[in-house]
Image (cartoon, rainbow, N blue to C red):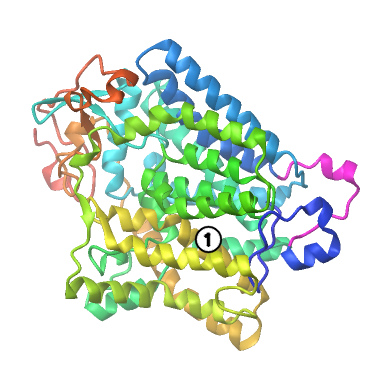
Amino acid sequence: MTATLADRGLPHPGLDREAAGPAGAAEGGLRLDARPASVRAAGLGHLPFAVVLLLAAAPNLLFLATHLANAPLAAGCIALLAAALVVVLRDLARTPEALDGRLLAVSLAVALVLCLLGGQTHLFFANDDWLLRDAVLRDLVAEPWPVGYLYAGDATMLRAPLGLYLLPAAIGSLVGLHGAHVALLAQDTALFGGLFYGFARLAPPRRSGLVLLAVFVGFSGWDIVGSTLVGDPLVPGIHLEQWLRDLQFSSHVTQLFWVPNHAASGWIFVGAYVLWRSSALRATSLAVVFGLCVIWSPLSAIGALPFLVAALVADAAAGRLTVSGATALGLAGIGLAPVALFLGADAGRVPHGLQDLTMGFGSRYVLLMVFEVLPVLLVLHFAPGSVLGADRWARRETGLVLGVLLLVPLYRLGAVDFVMRASIPALALLALRVGAVMPRLRGPQLAIAAGILGFGAVTPLYEVIRTLRVPAFSISSCNLLASARTPPNNGPLYHYVARVEALRGHLADHVLAKPTTQIRLVPQAMCWPDHPAHQEHAGEVF
């Protein structure tokens, strides 16, 4: 990723780097490589994102190979998606650049530490969401695909965003459950490390890139101030972000520690989007990447959709759409159609709809914007030019970011899932913008901006304190039905399973394979007897 996020705004999309010359580079904020073309051509600077792209594609290909009704259909969809991937990789290879090995090593190390601290492999404490996540991974390792359950008297199938799990589970089917957890750690380290590298490359030289990466990792709103305002306890290590109850913009560390699948979906798209913005990818390739992200998290993908539409419109208006790109998009769309059918199967049972626009909701909404968005705009105020950005595209993009953040709290899906997940791409782009501004500030402006970001960084600091203070617990071999008995994850499983009968009469019934076995709930011992919150129940049979 070669675009430099200038402190006056973001570069113009679609600028041809090879023909831009010094004037074009100055206008667009792009860093040109003055080395001979033969040296540039040998560069591997986009290799980390190519690895990210392949990791994003892997679960889609595994799903198509194992979850469709018949082999010819599966083979056809795989062939279509593979052809589209080849076009995207060739598109990425148009703009070679040098690989910064030291920056890549730092990025991978940061990703590894965060994944471990987030509870992967259970070397450190894992938050509540991992109780069900462990169970999903266990079922995919131990059971035939698609996984079936007898739940609430119905024959059901596992229907969830499986992007995080399928590749580690496929490895775990060969080497066991603990091997699957190690594979999950390796997958996420490579994926997030590659994304961190690409983000850091947006602000050369390396020192500025490391500042940007630090800002991105520590990015959060003023949850410590909001929690103080509503009288919540401020004991170090508690989860600060629930002070508005049904409204939350999650910090980046929270996303990695609690919901890495949702973070991956949003950040993979953003990684491709900033490549499009520097002309390293066409908008049609960006659309293919968007399709790959859906199996990781459709909610994060929804939040990315406005930026995808803007990119497609910009490329169409500038005449940058190509026949090969449009063909790749069509191939990927057909090949990934079964994924959409799968994720939409019986999904209507998940509670959803517009928020109740009461006075209480209105006051919480205002507080969300004041303490989660306004502080970031204050930092951007120190950059030269408009807070929205100096050039036209920067203003449009920042307007999209703010528009998404203003709109997503107005809809609910489940409890607070929609607002937390659909905001991920916009928050990531906002963090990158702030991270690019920080290395350019000096004196009092730098001190004030650092203080503003420091108040936000208390939130991820609390997440790290908790994972270091609370004892770790063992990996469980319980299945999803057994794990779902444990509070706070003992609610309905409508967001994890779909009734097989509900597929009758729909296209999904003809496209998707059905489970050959059904997991049943049977009495057994506590799933996590060494969990700090559950030790008083150890030895009980449920």
Q: Residue at x 76, y 52 (%)?
A: 16
Q: Along the horizontal axis of the image, is 467 left or right of 415?
A: right
Q: Which amino acid is tagged 1?
A: Leu
Where does the image place residue 537, in percent across and percent down from the top left?
11, 43
Residue 149's image quarter? Answer: top left
Q: Residues within 10 Å of mark 1 (few under 14, many from 20)?
A: many
Q: Locate residue 332 relative to residue 100 in the image: left or right.
A: left
26 or 528: nearer the viewer: 26
Vertical placement of 454 versus 44: above or below?
Answer: below
Q: What residue is shown at x 22% (from left), y 34% (from top)? A: 346
**Image: 393 above or below 19:** below
Rendering quarter of residue 84? top right
Viewer-closest of 437 and 489: 437
Q: In which quadrant will I find the C terminus?
A: top left
Which residue sits at x=44%, y=19%?
A: 65
Q: Secondary structure at mark 1?
A: helix
Q: Camera-side residue: 413 or 528?
A: 413
- Which secondary structure dominates the residues rendered in magenta? loop
Q: Is residue 293 above or below residue 391?
A: above
- Magenta region: which residues? 30-45
User: In which quadrant of the rendered view does residue 502 lie?
Assistant: top left
The residue that disc 1 covers is 429
Q: Would residue 504 be counted in the magenta stretch? A: no
Residue 367 spot, x, y in % from top left:
30, 76
Question: Where's residue 479, x and y in %?
Answer: 23, 29
Left/right of residue 455 with respect to residue 358 in the rendered view: right
In this orientation, does residue 475 appear? no
Q: Quick one: 433 or 281, which is closer to the camera?
A: 281
Is 19 displayed left or right of 354 in the figure?
right
